[in-house]
Image (cartoon, grey):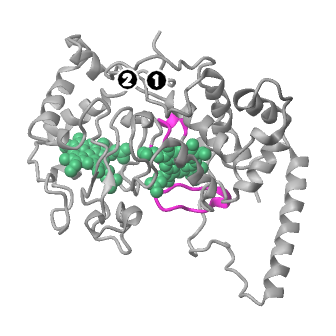
């Protein structure tokens, strides 16, 4: 068994703990007369994946909370009860990278939202604690501060609300928030930091401010600083014409006319923040039902939130199921009209009849949407 710790003593302690827990679980199973679970102990009987690597925080020391990304009218708006402050962002940042948020200490938010991967995951379907495979591709967290509904199916109404999802999920951070909060409360550094952000001056640090609500507020504040703007396309639009190559300019033109991309990828963040069935997943057995799962409205079946296209060159594979490997294949998919046989396909999806060269132009345009961000700070 390979454990993700370099320290062999830690490994053996962990190993014996695992064995102990396993024995306890087994005896509980036989006492209650349940069937012994399958070998991989994964509820859905899915095979296990490889636990993603744990990224270290190599973002710039200072992250601005006030800088307006080029191409946008402002910074992401924060809710009235959760103003973005530098101190809160720094706590949220620490939590985002810390595997203490998972029940077995092996997975952090950053494991699936990897900075060097555009804050998305290279795994087609996200893999969490114990190698459990989830259901969908981990999308980027970049510019989600500008979002209105969160997750592919839009089930969450704020970033604050979204944070608790992965903590409650058995296939992501392990599904035991109480245990995670207990571990945070036993950590004096966190107790002090939560207190200085959320406590009142007069009290001395107590673990009381270490709550799920405050944890969510801190992480959401950090996420609001993960913006990307001032891409070559923004600079071109701001009259710096030479910023965009001839090919990317052609691509921009196709995007905004014949390609019909603008119909859904609209506005500064290239998303209408609405839900569409583009035909991804059509013909798959047990097709993921998308927004229907969040609303139970049959009209919402197979619809997914239009994702931003900013920094999209870093976030392969694409789509809610990670089924499309490259940007060129994405454009080829649209060129075919998505899945023309899908009876509930969005009416805006039509075959495009683009030439091979025009497909290349669109790809060049998509790459020119990479911007300035914490990954690529402006100098
Ligand atoms: C095991 C991998 C995994 C971990 C760990 C994880 N996420 Fe995610 N994240 C996902 C997946 C998959 C989705 C899409 C879920 C869906 O649509 O059903 C997602 C969605 C999101 C979204 C919504 C993005 C959008 O487009 O609306 C945000 C924000 C987010 N995660 C932040 C976090 C934070 C913060 C943490 C840590 C508390 C975290 N994630 C931990 C895999 C992960
Ligand atoms: C009918 C609305 C609609 C139109 C038109 C549209 N898109 Fe999309 N786009 C979406 C939705 C919704 C998704 C997510 C689909 C899914 O995962 O099931 C998406 C996904 C993508 C992705 C993958 C992003 C990621 O992070 O996985 C890219 C790239 C993309 N679109 C580019 C384009 C281009 C280029 C065009 C024009 C040729 C276009 N789109 C036209 C709605 C649309």
Above or below, 229 against 329 in this view is above
Q: Nearer the viewer, residue 157 or 286?
A: 157
Residue 68 image-quadrant placement: top left
Crowd around label 1: few <14 · some 14–19 · many ≥20 (10 Å): many
Name the dominant secondary structure of the magenta segment.
loop
Horizontal and vertical percent position of residue 112: 56, 46
What residue is shown at x 30% (from left), y 20% (from top)? 232
Q: Which residue is mark 2?
A: 229
Horizontal and vertical percent position of residue 121: 50, 46
Does dot 1 land on a helix, a strand or a loop?
loop
What residue is shown at x 81% (from left), y 86% (from top)? 30
Horizontal and vertical percent position of residue 167: 63, 53
* Res. 121 visible in picture: no
Residue 366 image-quadrant placement: top left
First in sequence: mark 1 vs mark 2: 2
Left or right: 329, with 131 as reference point: left
Q: Residue furthest bottom?
A: 33
How far is the residue under mark 1 from the one under mark 2? 7 Å
Left or right: 111, with 357 as reference point: right
Q: Check residue 126 for magenta coloring.
A: yes
Q: Tell me where the magenta segment starts and ends, as one range.
A: 114-139
Q: Nearer the viewer, residue 162 or 116?
A: 162
What residue is shown at x 47% (from left), y 44% (from top)? 158
Above or below, 160 against 228 in this view is below
* Res. 114 visible in picture: yes
What residue is shown at x 46% (from left), y 51% (from top)? 156
Q: Which residue is mark 1?
A: 373
Q: Check residue 352 for magenta coloring.
A: no
Res 153 label: none
**Is there CB contact under 8 Å for labels 1 and 2?**
yes
Left or right: 71, with 18 as reference point: left
């Amino acid at each position: 068994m390979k454990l993700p710790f370099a320290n062999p003593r830690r490994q053996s302690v962990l190993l014996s703990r695992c064995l102990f827990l396993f024995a306890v679980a087994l005896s509980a199973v036989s006492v209650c007369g349940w069937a012994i679970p399958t070998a991989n102990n994964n509820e859905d009987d899915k095979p296990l994946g490889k636990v993603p690597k744990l990224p270290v925080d190599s973002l710039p020391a200072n992250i601005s909370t006030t800088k307006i990304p080029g191409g946008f009218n402002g910074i992401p708006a924060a809710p009235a009860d959760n103003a973005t402050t530098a101190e809160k962002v720094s706590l949220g940042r620490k939590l985002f990278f810390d595997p203490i948020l998972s029940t077995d200490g092996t997975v952090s938010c950053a494991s699936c939202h990897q900075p060097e991967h555009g804050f998305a995951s290279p795994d087609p379907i996200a893999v969490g604690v114990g190698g459990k495979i989830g259901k969908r591709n981990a999308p980027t967290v970049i510019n989600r501060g500008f979002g209105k509904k969160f997750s592919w199916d839009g089930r969450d109404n704020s970033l604050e609300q979204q944070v608790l999802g992965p903590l409650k999920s058995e296939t992501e951070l392990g599904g035991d928030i109480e245990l995670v909060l207990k571990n945070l409360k036993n950590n004096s550094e966190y107790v002090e930091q939560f207190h200085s952000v959320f406590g009142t001056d007069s009290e001395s640090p107590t673990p009381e401010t270490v709550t799920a609500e405050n944890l969510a507020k801190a992480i959401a504040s950090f996420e609001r600083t993960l913006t990307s703007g001032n891409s070559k396309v923004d600079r071109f639009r701001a009259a710096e014409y030479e910023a965009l190559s001839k090919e990317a300019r052609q691509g921009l033109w196709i995007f905004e006319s014949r390609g019909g991309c603008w119909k859904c990828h609209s506005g500064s963040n290239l998303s209408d923040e609405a839900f569409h069935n583009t035909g991804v997943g059509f013909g798959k057995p047990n097709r993921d039902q998308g927004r229907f799962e969040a609303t139970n409205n049959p009209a919402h079946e197979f619809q997914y939130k239009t994702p931003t296209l900013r920094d999209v060159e870093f976030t392969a594979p694409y789509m809610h199921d990670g089924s499309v490997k490259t940007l060129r294949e994405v454009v080829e998919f649209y060129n075919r009209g998505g899945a023309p046989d899908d009876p509930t396909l969005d009416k805006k999806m039509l075959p495009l009849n683009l030439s091979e060269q025009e497909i290349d132009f669109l790809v060049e345009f998509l790459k020119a949407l990479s911007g300035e961000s914490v990954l690529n700070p402006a100098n």
